[in-house]
Image (cartoon, rainbow, N blue to C red):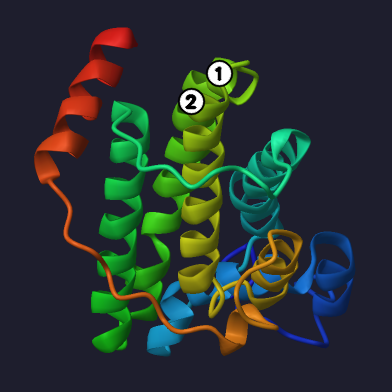
Amino acid sequence: LAEDGQKMSKSKKNYPDLMLIVNKYGADALRYYLMSSPVVHAQDVAFAERGVDEVVKKHIGRLNNVVTFYEMYATGNEPKTVSNNILDQWILARLYQLQKEVTDSLEKYEIDRASRPFADFIDDLSTWYVRRSRDRFKSEDINEKSKALNTTREVILGLVKVLAPFMPFVSEDIYLRLRGDKQSVHLDSWPTASKFDPKTIEYMREIRRFAS
């Protein structure tokens, strides 16, 4: 359906040229928008360009900002450390939760449902984890700085592996920038979601509620 609710029609020209949409927002934004819509169930969908624009701003833009911030401080030679920092434990738990939710939905062929958790996760990563960890990224304590950088890298790579079916080009670009283990994110193994403690996620949810 066009934005006015009418059937899309070439003669009426009541929908934008999709190649113009691709050129303006990128193929991944359009792909994700359609995969998260009822069209994957062969149902009608009212196509709205603002929806594609929202994908760029809330998903791709925020994620790229996180990657750029990581690249500002990472050297690639950070010592490997196991972090007991609550922020690191929380964002890893959120990653494992995301991977499980996406995997479970894809195995049921619920593609639109599989796409939904990404928005909240990217928001958590960008507006809570990175913002709360800024001082750690800049810290002169190499051990603490390494914990934040290593965790961020692990989370970004773990994210793009499950994001790849929805945003193949964006995921590939980020994977190569962070030098993943394979030549391509599409050649890497699908992550097996690790066990996580739901209490860690609930604990941080309460902290954020109080902070707001």
Q: Considering the image in quadrants, where does the C terminus appear?
A: top left
- In this rendering, the answer to whether 155 lies above or below 7 is above
Q: Which residue is mark 1?
A: 141
- Front-most of 172 and 5? 172
Q: Which mark is residue 87?
A: none
CA gap, disc 2 and disc 1: 5 Å
Residue 81: x and y in percent read: 42, 42
> Could you say which quadrant of the image residue 182 lies in?
bottom right
Q: Quadrant of residue 22?
A: bottom right
Answer whether residue 36 is visible to the viewer in this image: no
Disc 2 + disc 1, Cβ < 8 Å: yes
User: Residue beneath label 2, please?
Assistant: 144
Mark 1: give few (<14), some (14-19) or many (20+) Cα within 10 Å.
few
Q: Secondary structure at mark 2?
A: helix
Tell me residue 19's x, y (percent): 86, 78
Q: Nearer the viewer, residue 74 or 27?
A: 74
Q: Is residue 94 left or right of residue 167?
A: left
Task: Give the left or right position of residue 97, taking residue 64 as reference.
Answer: left
Side (left or right) of 89 relative to 166 = left
Q: Quadrant of the N terminus?
A: bottom right
Picture coordinates of residue 150, whole percent (x, y): 52, 45
Q: Which residue is at a point 65% across and 77% down the rendered structure image?
A: 168
Residue type at the position of mark 1? Asp
Q: Is residue 150 visible?
A: yes
Query: How many labels were placed on the picture?
Result: 2
The residue under the point 15% across, 33% down is: 202
Does residue 195 appear to the left or right of 175 in the view shown? left
Q: Give the residue at x 55% y 75%.
A: 166
Image coordinates for residue 122, horizontal then vertical, percent: 49, 46
